Amino acid sequence: MGNTQTPAKPPTRRNAVRDLFQVPNVVAGISVGAYIIPQAMAYGSLAGVTPSASLTISVVPLVVYMILGRNTSMSLGPESTVALMTAAAVGPVAASQGIPWATALAVTTTLVGVILGIGWLIKASFLADLLSNPILTGYMTGVAILMIVSQLPKILGFDLNTDTIGELISSEWQTPNAHTILIATIVVVLSLISRRISNRIPGPLLGLAVATLVGLFFTDIERVGEVSLELPAVGFQGFDVEVVVALMLPALSIAVVSFTDVMVTSRAFAGKERPNASMEMRALAGTQFASGMAGGYPMSASSSRTALAFAAGSTTRFYSVFVIVFIIAGPLLLPGVIAQVPISALAGVIVFAAITLVSLPDWTALARFRFGEVAVAATCTLAVVFVGILPGVLIAIVLSIVELLMRLARPHDGVLGFVPNMPGMHDIDDHDGTETLPGLLVFRYDAPLFFMNAYDFFYKVTGALEPDTQVVLLNMEANVELDTTALDVMDELHDTLDADGIDLWLARVKNDVLIPLRDHGTADIVGEENMYPTLPVAVDAYRERYLSD
């Protein structure tokens, strides 16, 4: 018998408690707690939630993820991008439908949870891969710009219309308040310096502390005011089907972006374990639904807070117990201190978060790789900035799909030949001195065959014919799928070649492709005697049949 491994015993309750109180988990909890308090207060304002309510509601995702999640370092909670998307969704619907902001907010968040729950049930976790890196780079840059723009009134100290860039430019500008600018700048600068020194330093919290001390010397600035542990006003009264329909598409956009964010973060901090996309979708669905029921706003993963927990060496997701204790202790032990936090300081936290969303190395890498990638990213940025954050999400998704279809519609193809002293057959354009057999055209098309590329495939094959071609041998290892259009084109290709006295052979046909070839009748047209398991077998058959003399 082979070696067997005794299954690991499930952890006992005593072991779980002992593991929880390991030093790395305590450090992770305190570090994340120090980060989440200023972020919750700041990001909640983006979504139209008071600092007190945002602090309280940030406990919900921590509890739900401890129950449903799997990643030992993940920090679900307030996140700047999703908060801004929520505001963009809730505001217009609340105004047009004549319902309170709290109602639109609760319905939106609950819908996000329902959509993710349905996605989990139908195994739609592939949505995490829907947005490509260029799309995400451009999208995040656009969101960062809008985040900074949205905070200008708080930083400058006077009202501005920041709904669109055009309305911002045409607004009536006043003399800025130097004190609010100074306080926001202190937070941004200290946060950036702390981040440069070490990710473990809670820069936003440090910035808020210093800005609050400085703010005590000024009387012309707005402050957070009294804080307490309170839930947002739960507002399900007065909504109807029209409200749900109006919020459905924005909720879908938020669901896609928040889940993508969770999976990107999960992959980055998964260690040796492969992230379970289905389980993460379930956990996020539960988080959003619970937050909605409590009157909160949609949550997502925080890469900065997750990085802190990962760096601290957290061994269990229950490190969030210490985060919750930290969140609750703040308003209870330091209510007077938090009340003195300047509103412009919270705006500084948001500006810092926006700066961290923009990755110059990613833009540089895209520019070096391919101009088209930069163009896609730039288009997405412009769409978010000038069309709006929610339409920008839809444009980003459409761009991703179009980009995918373009690659599938016009993939790489090549004529194969033999390279001296190199086994196998290779693209004749990749190597000098590649040799082909007289009368044999070995062709490879590197994509599944379907309606968008079937005729491109047809014309690429016929365009590669030589006057002496006797056999076209298709290497079908990359053609992992055929639709009806592709099968019809294969029949047409056979008839076209046959009219010129050229045989059509197939090699390396996978079983998943052989079945539709037989069902459609294409296998009978080509002749199964002309279908070979490998290229060498097919080439040997050609030599024997055509070159044996």
Image (spheres, grey):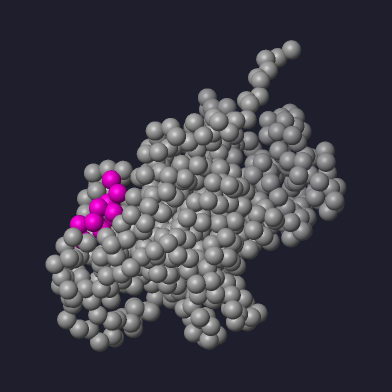
Whether residue 416 appears in this view of the structure is: yes
Residue 276 lies in the magenta-colored region: no
Which residue shows up at 59% across the image and 79% down it? 237
| 331 or 459: nearer the viewer | 331
Residue 206 lies in the magenta-colored region: yes
Left or right: 148 in relation to 508: left
Left or right: 449 in relation to 21: right
Indicate whether 58 appears above or below 318: below
Percent x, y for residue 196?
A: 24, 47
Indicate whether 321 appears above or below 366: above
Total marks placed: 0
Instruction: Tell me the quarter of the image containing the N terminus.
Output: top right
Q: What's drawn in magenta, residue-wise?
A: 201-211
Whether residue 376 appears in this view of the structure is: no
Indicate whether 22 appears above or below 92: above
Of helix, strand and loop, which mostly describes the magenta segment? helix
Instruction: Tell me the quarter of the image containing the C terminus.
Output: top right
**Quarter holding residue 536:** top right
Left or right: 459 in relation to 486: left
Percent x, y for residue 444?
A: 62, 45
**Quarter holding residue 404:** bottom right
Percent x, y for residue 188?
A: 24, 59
- View extreme (top): residue: 1
Percent x, y for residue 429?
A: 50, 43
Which residue shows up at 75% across the image and 46% down it? 513
Indicate whether 205 appears above or below 246: above
| 89 or 236: nearer the viewer | 236
Which residue shows up at 52% across the image and 24% down it? 421
| 30 or 357: nearer the viewer | 30
Which residue shows up at 55% across the image and 85% down it? 97
